[in-house]
Image (cartoon, helix red, strand yellow):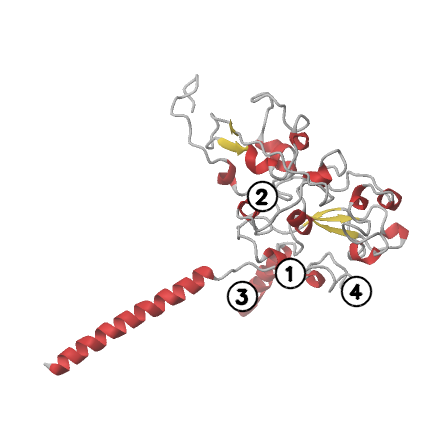
Amino acid sequence: MLRTILLGAGLVLMLMVAYAPSQAEYGDVILNKHSEKSGVRPVVFPHWFHRIRFQCKVCHAEPEFKMRAGATVMQMADIMGGKFCGKCHNGTIAWGVDRCDLCHSGRPGLATGTAGGHKTGGPGRY
Amino acid sequence: MANSLYNGMRGLLTFVGGTMLLLVIGASVAAEDKRSWKPLAADGIHDPASPAVGQLQAPSDALSKLPAEIGGDQVGWAEALRKGLIAPRAGADPKSGTQATVFDSDILLSPNGSLPPVRFPHRDHTQWLDCSNCHPQLFQMQKGASRISMVRILDGEQCGVCHGAVAFPLTECKRCHNAPWNVQPAPGGKR
């Protein structure tokens, strides 16, 4: 009897852990197409931080960043040339490209894509 | 006589005091913000060993000051904008003075579906987005010309490009399906 209860409790606990929501913030984007291959941590892009300061269209209009995580192909050279993140991260509007670690701050091994809790349980691809 | 008056007064005072205490407790419970955000070092995506952790702003620092909402990142972004709690710039450069081109027009979608129709507010969307973000790739400019389906939306297309990713999630059915049905039945008898 006790064994059954313990087993049941263990199962419930395992399920709770398995279904625990992701702890990252809604709309956090991980960029790791080139980062780790080039010896730096993956990039974590927090949508929440940027949308407090900028409207979506500042980055998403004039097809700069496509609205699909990982769909935009970019290299550090583009950013240094003032494109993509480099539009603001140039030492004038926001910190410059010399502060590598501030953007390249992700845990090693992360896959490119969106992270974050409360995401729709549907088959969506973001 | 005096004793019963005293007892009566005491009872009344206890009643009033108790009610006030309950009211205060009730108010504090209602005002309590139950939202919580993980610190960056514990969010599962930042490397705790990264020098950025401790330098970057913590989500709770910014988001706890914004209106609460159940879904998504627990922030009512449209409300935050309306109340002037945030003022996101329309251009990258603050000196450019670019302003948002707000288009105030509601579109009624899916008037004959099994859920109430959708009242799409252009206003709330154009405060963030440019027309070209949605038109014409996601939706044709002409009303009714695009076949909008929940299957596609749930698959991250159409409304689902943002809703479920950065805007409130698709579990909040009634936030979009919020308009009254037209009382006139559509041809075929189906509402």
Q: Which residue is mark 3?
A: A5
Expressed as whole percent of the image width and height from the top left, the position of residue A44 reads: 75, 52
The Cα atoms of the two marked residues, 2 and 1, are separated by: 20 Å
State which chain disc 2 sits on.
B
Residue B57 percent across, percent down from the top left = 69, 59
Residue at label 1?
B38
Q: Is residue B13 left or right of residue B172?
A: left
Residue type pointed to by label 3: Ile
**Of all residues shown, which one is farthest toward the left?**
B1
Q: Are marks 4 and 3 in contact (CB under 8 Å)?
A: no
Tell me which chain the residue with mark 1 is part of. B
Give the amino acid at mark 2: Pro
**SS class, disc 1:** loop
Rounded to the nearest whole Å, what is the CA distance between mark 4 and mark 3?
40 Å
Q: Are marks 4 and 1 on the same chain?
A: yes
Q: Is residue A1 above or below residue B1?
A: above
Q: Nearer the viewer, mark 2 or mark 3?
A: 2
Asked if both marks, 2 and 1, belong to the same chain, the answer given is yes
Q: In the rendered image, is residue A67 in sight?
A: no
Quadrant in which residue A54 is drawn: top right
- In the rendered image, the residue lying farthest to the top is B187
Element type at mark 3: helix
| Residue A115 visible, this orientation | yes
| Distance of label 1 from label 3 (alpha carbons) | 33 Å
User: Do badges 2 and 4 share one subunit?
Assistant: yes
Cα–Cα gap, marks 2 and 3: 37 Å
User: Which chain letter goes with mark 4?
Assistant: B
Disc 1 marks a residue whose amino acid type is Lys
Q: Which mark is residue B169?
A: 2
Q: In the displayed structure, would residue B113 be above or below residue A30?
A: above
The quadrant of the rendering that contains the N terminus of chain B is bottom left
Q: Which mark is residue B49?
A: 4
